[in-house]
Structure formats: structure tokens, C-alpha cells
Amino acid sequence: MQQYNHDSIQNDNDASGILPIRERRPIPASDGFIVTELSERPVKYHIARTFHGGPNDAECHSLAMSSCRVVCYATDAVRGKINVEHLHRAMTSQCMDRLQTMAYLVDTHMLTHPELKARFCYLPAIPHWITGMLISDDTLETAVQLTIGRDAYLANMKFEMIGSRWMCTYADLG
């Protein structure tokens, strides 16, 4: 059984890419705030990386804004406030189809539950925070907390660079 010596210096020919502990550098994250129309306070975001490099802070700010916008529009689409087709430039067709199915199921459920419809369908969706993880140069996963009235919801989304555009490939609203 071989033990790892923390004081040893790694051989330059080692192809593993793992740096000795004293040479490791923390991977930077992007933190900031975005201002939304309906929120009383700016929405805090934190986007971490699993690698060095990738999008800079300004690009992470844009990704956080896009993520927030897509989550709010997707929530409005599920509640029947807008048509899912409004998201065609931000979502893949498979993701839009699933969102359309969810909107149909929610609408059908609301027909028999008017008290739930009053709480869920009429008040605005207000985002509170966004947490994201850049998995690679072309993949971002986010979690967004938002409230509708007094009820808090979490939305998980996955964005991938398709061509030259970040597209939502997965949306889980709940």
C-alpha cells in the first residue's frame, strides 16, 4: 500500500494533472447582484466553476440574468400567463415540449382546485437568489429560488452552449 507524501514534489512528467497540495489554487467563483423589475431587493447570484478559465465575471453576470429571465418566463408559461412558444429562442424544442406538458397538467389540476389557482396563478413570480455551477465551458446548471405570493419554489435548469447561444436543455420547476 502506497502512502501519499504531502511534502513531495510532483514529477513534471506526471500526466495526471493533479497538483501537490501546496501548489493548488482555489477555483474562482463569480458573485454579484442583478436587478429585477418585481423584486424589492437585487437578486444575489453565485456561479462556481469546476475548472480554471471559462466565462469571465461579465459573462457570468449575463448568464445569471438569462437564467433568471428564463426561469420567470418558464414559470409564467406553466401558470398559463404566456405561451411556451415565447421561449423558443432560449429553450430546446424537447425542453419546450416538456414544459408544455407540465403547463397542461397544471391547468387541468387548477380546474378542480380554485383556491390553489388563486395562490399560484395570479401573483407574480419573484426571484430571490441564483446559484450556478459551470460544469464545463459549455454547460451551466442553476438553481433559482422564487416566490409566488407566500409560497417558495425552486427551479433547476441546465443550460448548454448550442452553436453560439446558451440554450436551456432541462427545466425542473417545483
Image (cartoon, rainbow, N blue to C red):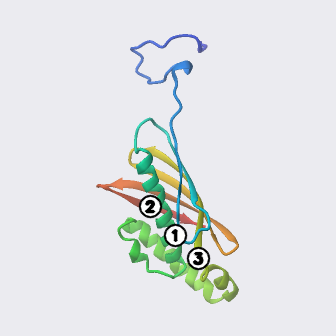
Residue under numbered circle 1? 72
Disc nearer the start of the sequence (3/2): 2
- Above or below, 144 against 10 in this view is below
User: Which label sits on residue 90?
Assistant: none
User: Is 49 drawn above or below residue 163 in the view shown?
Assistant: above
Work out which quarter of the rendered image holds the N terminus and state it. Answer: top right
* Image spot of residue 8 (x, y percent): 54, 10
Determine the secondary structure under disc 3: loop
Residue 111, quarter of the rendered image = bottom right
What amino acid is found at the position of numbered circle 1 in the picture? Answer: Cys
Q: Residue at x 41, y 37 (%)?
A: 53
Pointer 2: what residue? 66
**Which residue occupies 53% across, 31% down?**
26
Which mark is on residue 124?
3
Q: How far, Cα to Cα, is label 3 from label 2?
A: 18 Å
Residue 122 appears in the rendering:
yes
Amino acid type at image mark 3: Pro
Q: Is disc 2 surrounded by few (<14), some (14 to 19) or many (20+) residues within 10 Å?
A: some
Name the residue type under label 2: Ser
Taking the spot 59% from the left edge, 68% from the top edge, the residue there is 39
Residue 2 at least partly seen? no
Q: How many marks?
A: 3
Q: Position of residue 149 (x, y in %)?
A: 67, 75
Image spot of residue 93 (x, y percent) = 37, 68
Front residue (pair 30, 74): 30
Question: Which residue is at 49% across, 71% downward?
Answer: 74
